[in-house]
Amino acid sequence: MKPPLFDYVTPESVEEAVAARAAEVDSVLLAGGQSLLATLNFRIANPALLIDISRIPSLRGIDVNDSEIIVRAMVRQREVELSEAVHQANPLVREVLQNVAHTVVRNRGTVAGSIAHADAAAELPAMLLAVEGSVDVQGPGRKRSIAAGDLFQFHLTTSLADDEMIIAVRIPVLPPATGWSYMEFARRHGDYALAGICALVTLDGDGRCTKARLSACGIASTAVRLASAEEELTGDMLDETAIARAAKAARDAVTAVDDSQASTAYRRHLVDTLTRRTLIQAKGRVA
């Protein structure tokens, strides 16, 4: 299929891009295009204006400091995946990215683009929730930060205003004594996951869980934080009993209805199994 007709502009600054966005409410931003082009071709998106932000120099580059990783909006997923500085700062990022589609897609797709697209089955929104990250957003004459927990509202829907754009994604550095894991199940490698689980656990010197952060994709109308499962772990030893309680609590977060890919019951089974496995792996990675 071919996309609908639209006007096309190539701003050379963020200010030009947000001005174009504000001038035409029926506009979309093009970064890597790996999500957008499909929605255009299937006429899911039918914008009057396409704003190509690929020529904006300030949207390129990765910064890593002692507290966070800053990924600007035109940084490709593959660049982040291969960055040793990013991997040393937070190894969960590479593990998640290795599950995103295929290498050819990650060569073009951007981290910020996937997060802005907010597909409920996508891995990167779930990762941003688990690490308690945020996005930097710019609109005409204003900037703000949105925490991941306040960003995702529904499938393909975020709290961004119509005249705003993400200019950077902020991913906290992995805290000390914290283990990580991401696992998912898809019918074929590269497909969207029927369910995926991100797990981060911080242990004290006695092996007691002082903080747990779990999130999931593919099981609800957005990526979701598994708060009830986290509560089952915090303050307890990360033993088989605690992990089983957390897995049972995680099952209750599944709200996706039966579809052609899986039933609700099957997704709950997947969430139970994946939660157990990610927690065991994360515990084993605590240094």
Image (cartoon, helix red, strand yellow):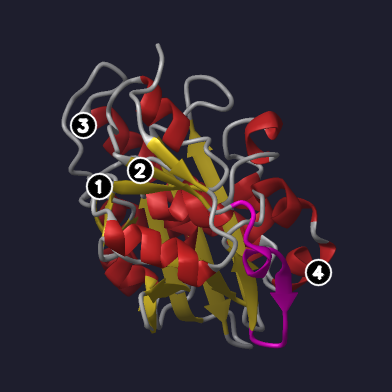
* CA–CA distance in space, label 1 to label 3: 35 Å
Identify which residue, 25 or 251, lies in the foreground. Answer: 25
Point out residue 202 in the picture as x, y percentages from the top left corner.
55, 78
- The label number, if any, that marks residue 26 in the structure image: 1
Residue numbers of the magenta segment: 54-67
Q: Which residue is tagged 3? A: 264
Cβ atoms under marks 1 and 3 closer than 8 Å: no
Point out residue 266 in the picture as x, y percentages from the top left corner.
29, 28
Identify which residue, 29 or 200, lies in the foreground. Answer: 29
Q: Residues within 10 Å of mark 2 (few under 14, many from 20)?
A: many
Residue type (three-letter) at the residue carrying disc 3: Thr
Disc nearer the start of the sequence (1/4): 1
Q: Which residue is tagged 4? A: 85
SS at mark 1 in the image: loop
Q: Is residue 56 magenta?
A: yes
Point out residue 88 in the picture as x, y percentages from the top left corner.
78, 70
Disc nearer the start of the sequence (4/2): 2
